[in-house]
Image (spheres, grey):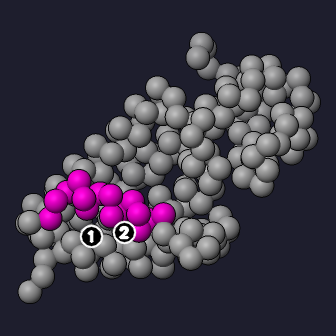
Amino acid sequence: MGRPLRADAARSVRAILEAAEHVLAEDPGASMEQIAEQAGVARTTVHRRFANRQALIEALAASAKQQLMESMEDAHLDTAPPLVALHRATANGLRIKSVWRFTLGHPLADTPLTAVIWSEINAVTLEFLARAQREGLLAPEVDLMWARRVYYALVDEALHGGGADLDPDQVRQNADALATLVVDTFLRGMGPHG
């Protein structure tokens, strides 16, 4: 993008993105007009900020994945004790993923920018798992690529497993308990045995 948006323009973009996520999660075929109505802005405002539906979806994806990356940074994966960092990253990730259900699962949201962010998330996760392994949280023989896939699957299962599909408020209220469940399950399979 060009220069930074004024505060009021940034607020309207944020309102549009939040409304779009909410509306599209309920009805993936929703119109730009429905999104504008939910955001409390004129349809022309939505079109001024986002040329078309695909541009809006791409902006949603960039915002969601950037928030995921920031939630990982907030967990201090490189400095906090590994168990603390893993729990915090898991709880943070659950909170973010619960809010961005449509966007994080939508194939049209995959763009070169989001691919870069997702690649960074994958790399940071793998670096953390290597550190956790060096510090004894994970067994020495664990394949870290497999461990990452299992961890991601457990997080997804905590949000959607068995048709549960917890709403964002339920996840926010129970994020620590869900994170504990994910981490305990993960470590029983990947932690040292014996």
Q: Residue at x 33, y 45 (%)?
A: 122
Main SS, magenta residues:
helix
Q: Position of residue 166 (x, y in %)?
A: 63, 71
Amino acid under disc 1: Leu
* Range shown magenta: 142-156
Residue placed under numbered mark 2 in the picture: 87
Q: Is residue 135 visible?
A: no
Q: Residue furthest top?
A: 2
Q: Which mark is residue 18?
A: none
Q: Quadrant of residue 174?
A: bottom right
Q: Position of residue 10 (x, y in %)?
A: 70, 30
Q: Residue at x 71, y 39 (%)?
A: 17
Q: Are marks 1 and 2 in contact (CB under 8 Å)?
A: yes
Indicate whether 187 appears above or below 38: below
Q: Rounded to the nearest whole Å, what is the CA distance between mark 1 and mark 2?
A: 6 Å
Q: Quadrant of residue 75?
A: bottom left
Q: Secondary structure at mark 2?
A: helix
Residue placed under numbered mark 1 in the picture: 83
Q: Is residue 5 visible?
A: yes
Q: Position of residue 13 (x, y in %)?
A: 73, 32
Q: Residue at x 58, y 17 (%)?
A: 1
The answer to whether residue 90 is magenta is no
Q: Quadrant of residue 47?
A: top right
